[in-house]
Amino acid sequence: MKIGILSRKSTIYSTNSLVEAAKKRGHFVSVIDPLRCYMDITSHHPAIHYKGEKLEGFDAIIPRIGASITFYGTAVVRQFEMMGVYCVNESVAISRSRDKLRSLQLLARKGIGLPVTGFAHSTKFTDDLISMVGGAPLVVKMIEGTQGVGVVLAETQQAAQSVIQAFRSLKANILVQEFIQESRGSDIRCWVIGSKVVAAMKRQGPEGEFRSNLHRGGQAARIKITPEERSTAIRAAKIMGLRVAGVDLLRSNHGPVVMEVNSSPGLKGIETITGIDVAGMVISYIEKNACPGKTGTKGKG
Ligand code: ADP
Ligand code: MG
């Protein structure tokens, strides 16, 4: 097969891991920087040009779109979809997962366990917003944050009010969320491919840190997940429309709650900790499922 990986750099661990896995299975693979793609969207034959040439003959695309380039990156994925190329994660699903509010609303609608979450535009009734989600301590987070940046724990009512007001005065869109204290600074990353959790790990933030992000100094460890956690992760990925996803769960007193669903989950931590060839499993999923023109959301925004 001819597989394209949409990624800024081939030296990124996850990108490199996918390249090696594809080569090992005898595929032709190339890394395409989405920001260097330019597109012909006016003709009856939609095309993508790259470095002076037309991109042709791809059987599958693996989008690895970083949060900082969601807008242009998803436009490139959409263009591949218009060309009938199979994209492992489709553009609509990627955009959806980048918006925490939109994601949580979709998950809530289908009855997935979530931390109690509130959202407001105005700061007029911040007191009521805070009591609506159960009062302090609570977590305030930016809608489009990533790697733990823009996620704040407000321990008191006053702290919560100031943080909410500060974010809103900067015009940042935020969520206000029940603090799941009982997870003690840890979360569970479930790597979902198709309808299976292929690997999972526990991430624990450093002493005194409630955020478990590896980018914030969190440590990863092996973990055995429960059947309920497994089915929650699989359902969450499916609701988001992601065939490949990193579903982050917290163990709460009221069962597993989903914190977010990532469309380009990293491979380094999960492969190192579990020893599982996750990249190889992504490629073998593509071998079984890639089919031209099989875009579920063709032509949809
Ligand atoms: P990001 O997209 O920046 O990773 P997350 O929503 O995943 O944002 O939050 C970052 C980390 O903060 C999580 O991995 C988790 O450890 C912690 N966290 C976030 N929300 C909560 C919450 N409601 N209760 C407890 N811990 C939380
Ligand atoms: Mg996260």
Image (cartoon, rainbow, N blue to C red):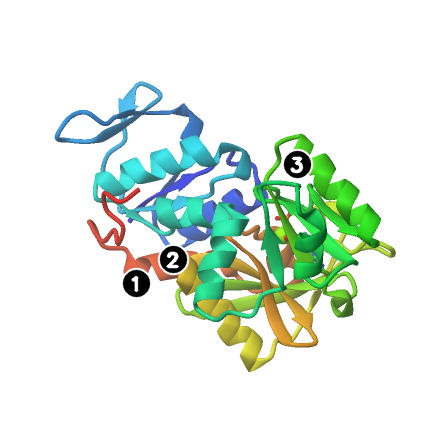
User: Horizontal placement of 228 versus 37: left or right?
Assistant: right
**Residues at marks 3 and 2, CA–CA distance in whole angstroms:** 31 Å
Question: Residue 208: percent from the left, percent from the top?
Answer: 87, 55
- Indicate if the residue with disc 1 has its beta carbon within 8 Å of ligand 2: no
User: Horizontal placement of 28 versus 111: left or right?
Assistant: left
User: Where residue 288 is drawn, which disc sits there?
Assistant: 1
- Dot 1 falls on a residue whose secondary structure is helix
User: Horizontal placement of 136 versus 86: left or right?
Assistant: right
User: Where residue 168 is drawn, which disc sits there?
Assistant: 3
Nearer to us of marks 1 and 3 is 3
Which of the 4 image quadrants contains residue 123?
top right
**Residues at marks 1 and 3, CA–CA distance in whole angstroms:** 47 Å
Q: Earlier in the sequence, mark 2 or mark 1?
A: 2
Residue closest to the eye, 290 or 43? 43
Q: Earlier in the sequence, mark 3 or mark 2?
A: 3
User: Horizontal placement of 276 versus 209: left or right?
Assistant: left
| Residue type, label 3 | Arg
Give neighbour class at mark 2: few <14, some 14-19, many 20+ (Cα, 10 Å).
Answer: many
| Residue type, label 1 | Lys
Which of the 4 image quadrants contains residue 80?
top left
Q: Residue furthest right?
A: 207
Nearer to us of marks 3 and 2 is 3
Residue assigned mark 2 = 241
- Dot 2 falls on a residue whose secondary structure is loop
